[in-house]
Image (cartoon, rainbow, N blue to C red):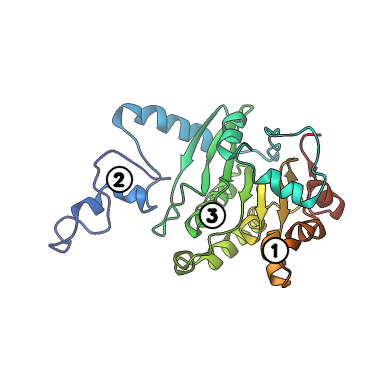
């Protein structure tokens, strides 16, 4: 963990050895937070309390898995069809990760950055929190396409939690990993593979709840082997129905039927043994 005071000088190169035309703002704590090298800037007035929370949270190991959160969305019935599951998972009214984290934790603190020059605040939320008197780490997708920095930050969190003996909760909610040209330049494939490895190698218990869209390897990378659950307003699949139909050379009108054939509903996943169960009904 790296915290910094506002305006602190943070950088590899000291002020006397930098290039003459170097932007001095790049060597500040604020710039290093944006670059993923520092977790947060903390003012002097909050430093004592912040350090107290970090020390409290990081020194409370536990061998018991974190329980999956209670569902917050439409939990009355399970989806009738595969496309119904997709439609409900994509609803703008469905609760997102921040709502789940607020309901689950009495207090939480965030980590930021992949230590490789990137952050993904819009796609992945990571940190540690207090749940029923004990510490649980969290890596939560926000419903957006997750970028490589988000996967690397989650892998960093899981490895740190593993060293400290802190259980991990992951929330899956993404249509898939970012697949634009910039994501490729940032090493999307390698970042996802590294997160798969971190989850698989973790000795500390990992619990996963699928809370919305669980599309492609970008979602599967966060899923705990043998301890993944799903809410009634979610789906989980190696590929989204539209992309599956395109690969199979099916016309757009067959997307809904393809969703049914993929067996992506929560109850299908339980029957297939992909997840342990659903939370809710």
Between 195 and 123, the one lying in front of the other is 123
Mark sitting on residue 92: none
Instruction: Tell me how far mark 3 sits from mark 1, CA to CA.
Output: 25 Å
In this rendering, the answer to whether 24 lies above or below 79 is: below
Task: Please name the residue that numbered disc 3 is placed on.
Answer: 146
Q: Mark 3 or mark 1, which has the lower sequence index?
A: 3
Mark sitting on residue 30: 2
Instruction: Tell me how far mark 1 sits from mark 2, CA to CA.
Output: 47 Å
Q: Are marks 2 and 3 in contact (CB under 8 Å)?
A: no
Figure disc tally: 3
Please tell me whether mark 3 or mark 1 is closer to you in this view.
1
Residue 69 drawn at (x, y percent): 68, 35
In this rendering, the answer to whether 146 lies above or below 90 is: below
Could you tell me which secondary element the residue under label 3 belongs to?
A: loop
Task: Please name the residue that numbered disc 1 is placed on.
Answer: 252
Q: Are marks 3 and 1 in contact (CB under 8 Å)?
A: no
Q: Are marks 1 and 2 in contact (CB under 8 Å)?
A: no
The residue at the point 50 percent across, 60 percent down is 148
Task: Place residue 50 in its image quadrant.
Answer: top left
Could you tell me which secondary element the residue under label 2 belongs to?
A: helix
Q: Mark 1 or mark 2, which has the lower sequence index?
A: 2
């Amino acid at each position: 963990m790296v915290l910094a005071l506002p305006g602190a000088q943070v950088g590899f190169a000291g002020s006397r050895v930098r290039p003459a035309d170097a932007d001095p703002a790049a060597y500040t704590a604020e710039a290093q937070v944006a670059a993923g090298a520092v977790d947060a800037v903390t003012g002097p007035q909050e430093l004592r309390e912040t350090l107290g929370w970090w020390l409290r949270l990081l020194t409370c190991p536990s061998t018991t898995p974190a329980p999956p959160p209670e569902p917050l969305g439409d939990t009355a019935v399970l989806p009738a069809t595969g496309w119904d599951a997709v439609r409900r998972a994509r609803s703008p009214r469905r609760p997102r990760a921040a709502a789940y984290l607020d309901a689950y934790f009495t207090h939480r603190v965030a980590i930021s950055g992949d230590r490789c020059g990137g952050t993904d605040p819009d796609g992945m939320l990571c940190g540690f929190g207090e749940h029923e008197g004990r510490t649980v780490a969290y890596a939560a997708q926000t419903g957006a396409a997750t970028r490589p920095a988000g996967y690397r930050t989650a892998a960093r969190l899981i490895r740190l939690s593993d060293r400290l003996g802190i259980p991990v909760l992951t929330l899956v909610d993404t249509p898939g990993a970012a697949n634009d040209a910039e994501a490729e330049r940032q090493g999307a494939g390698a970042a996802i593979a590294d997160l798969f490895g971190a989850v698989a190698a973790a000795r500390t218990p990992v619990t996963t709840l699928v809370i919305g869209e669980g599309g492609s390897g970008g979602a599967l990378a966060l899923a705990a082997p043998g301890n993944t659950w799903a809410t009634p307003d979610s789906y989980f699949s190696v590929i989204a129905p539209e992309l599956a139909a395109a690969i199979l050379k099916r016309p757009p009108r067959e997307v809904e039927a393809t969703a049914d054939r993929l067996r992506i509903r929560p109850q299908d996943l339980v029957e297939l043994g992909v997840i342990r169960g659903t939370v809710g009904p």
